[in-house]
Image (cartoon, rainbow, N blue to C red):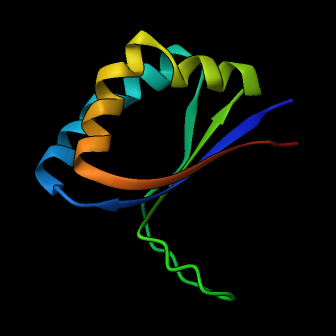
């Protein structure tokens, strides 16, 4: 069953975050992940959520997504993202 990582990112340091954008794709690809959404236009239609930058990643399995999250390949990019932004993130099984 596939899994999706959904992230709402508030960028606090655009220069450092630009470095993250360059660094992260290789780590995602190494675990079979791919971008479904990477930023772009977003509009609230209901509720009170005001997303900043939304990213959605697809992984073949929930376990594979967790392997990527805890991987050595993602360790440095993750630290870079955390130093340049504030994120809300969930991992969810899909169809």
Residue situated furthest left in the rendering: 15
Q: Position of residue 74 (x, y in %)?
A: 40, 21
Looking at the image, residue 95 lies above or below residue 40: above
Number of labels in the image equals: 0
Counting from the top left corner in percent of width and height, residue 3 is at 74, 36
Q: Horizontal and vertical percent for residue 6?
A: 60, 50
In this image, 26 relative to 17: left or right?
A: right
In the image, residue 51 above or below residue 14? below
Q: Which image quarter is the N terminus in?
A: top right
Front residue (pair 27, 74): 74
Examine the image and state in which quarter residue 76 appears: top left
Which of 46/90 is in front?
90
Horizontal arrangement in the rendering, residue 91 relative to residue 80 (left or right)? right
Residue visible at 28% across and 29% down in the picture:
23
Q: Give coordinates of residue 22: x percent, y percent.
A: 25, 34
Query: Where's the C terminus, which quadrant?
Result: top right
Query: Residue at point 50% right, 21% down?
Result: 29
Report the side of 20 relative to 44 (left or right).
left
Report the residue at 36% width, 31% height from top.
Answer: 78
Q: Is residue 73 above or below residue 77?
A: above
Q: Write the residue at 23% across / 43% down.
A: 83
Residue furthest to the top in view is 72
Judging depth in this view, the residue of 86 and 55 nearest the camera is 86
Q: Is residue 58 above or below residue 84?
A: above
């Amino acid at each position: 069953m596939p899994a999706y990582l959904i992230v709402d990112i508030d960028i606090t340091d655009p220069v450092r975050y630009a470095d993250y954008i360059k660094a992260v794709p290789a780590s995602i690809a190494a675990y079979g992940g791919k971008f479904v959404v990477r930023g772009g236009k977003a509009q609230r239609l209901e509720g009170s959520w005001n997303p900043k930058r939304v990213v959605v990643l697809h992984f073949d399995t929930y376990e594979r997504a967790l392997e990527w999250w805890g991987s050595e390949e993602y360790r440095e990019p993750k630290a870079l993202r955390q130093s340049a932004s504030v994120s809300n993130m969930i991992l969810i099984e899909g169809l």
